[in-house]
Amino acid sequence: MAVQGSQRRLLGSLNSTPTAIPQLGLAANQTGARCLEVSISDGLFLSLGLVSLVENALVVATIAKNRNLHSPMYCFICCLALPDLLVSGSNVLETAVILLLEAGALVARAAVLQQLDNVIDVITCSSMLSSLCFLGAIAVDRYISIFYALRYHSIVTLPRARRAVAAIWVASVVFSTLFIAYYDHVAVLLCLVVFFLAMLVLMAVLYVHMLARACQHAQGIARLHKRQRPVHQGFGLKGAVTLTILLGIFFLCWGPFFLHLTLIVLCPEHPTCGCIFKNFNLFLALIICNAIIDPLIYAFHSQELRRTLKEVLTCSW
């Protein structure tokens, strides 16, 4: 599990632009440009990974414990926590191995470390892809529950949800394996960027449409009570703030990573892009932060889930 300069090896193939590195240094010397590099220590990576690991493990355990939470909606929430858990677990494992290697407490052959690193890369990539898919699936599920409320339980059934989950995981593992194998192909990187943009547009369109419907509903109720303007404006502002936070966190945490991929395609040898490449560790840290935030947004707002979580924490099985 080699460390390339100041970069971690995790998904290091994404950050390996060997033709760009020498030219980047030369351009920096010629222009006198300085790069802003945010240093992320292994200790911080380990701390973020452990917090996310424990938090998402609690979400999975809580949903598994309470049969009332065995519904399609909570199935998707549980399946969102699982890839976040795997991303965090692989991060903790890699960070621990790096620290042990640096301290001289662990000795392993290069071939063994390479195989371990490849496995971690596949797990991380498949977890990232599946996490994005489940964020989209949650948005679709909520959209159907609002616009097709009377038919929701016949449209979104538990068997269909399980089949969707299985399909997402199979596709994520297959495509992540291909991605690791062919990471140096432009088409692969472009597919990942297009996939991220598609998920972003899907979530934005669905949630904006849901917000518009909710505002119309609130306006109708306000008319019945002859209090149209205050209620409608207040509800619309609150909904807009919630929507902005939801999409903003998604874009803030995932956007820099996919910007990194886009710049590898567009300007792998440009000095300015090289400065952005140096912050690869920061982009990975933001994804782990997203894994910490996801349960707060999608899981812990449920009163029944919080009540079951207390039972899990007190070990009252």
Image: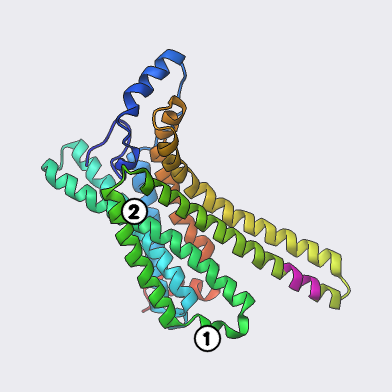
Number of numbered discs on residues: 2
Quadrant occupied by the C terminus = bottom left
| Above-or-below relation of 299 to 87 | below
Frontmost residue, 183 versus 86: 183
Residue that carries the numbered disc 2 in the rendered image: 125
Q: Which residue lies most toward the front here?
A: 187
Q: Would you place residue 100 above or below residue 271 in this image?
A: below
Magenta run includes residue 145: no
First in sequence, mark 1 or 2: give its number.
2
Residue located beneath label 1 in the image: 154
Given residues 49 and 259, the one toward you in this image is: 259
Q: What x and y, as percent, mark residue 283? A: 43, 42
The rendered magenta stretch, by its main secondary structure, is classed as: helix
Point 50% across, 58% down: residue: 199
For the N terminus, the image quarter is top left
Place of residue 296 in the rendered image (x, y in percent of width and height, measured from the top left): 51, 61
Residue 302 in sight here = no
On the image, the x and y values in percent for residue 239 come to 68, 62
* Residue 219 painted magenta: yes
Q: Amino acid at mark 2?
A: Cys
Helix, strand or loop under label 2: helix
| SS class, disc 1 | helix
Q: Residue at x 85, y 65 (%)?
A: 229
- Residue type of the residue flagged with mark 1: Ser
Q: Is residue 89 left or right of residue 234?
A: left
Asked if residue 8 can be seen in this view, the reply is yes
For residue 227, side relative to residue 307 (left or right) = right
Q: Are the two marked residues, 1 and 2, in contact with CB atoms closer than 8 angstroms?
A: no
Q: Is residue 310 left or right of residue 152?
A: left
Residue stretch rendered in magenta on the structure: 215-220
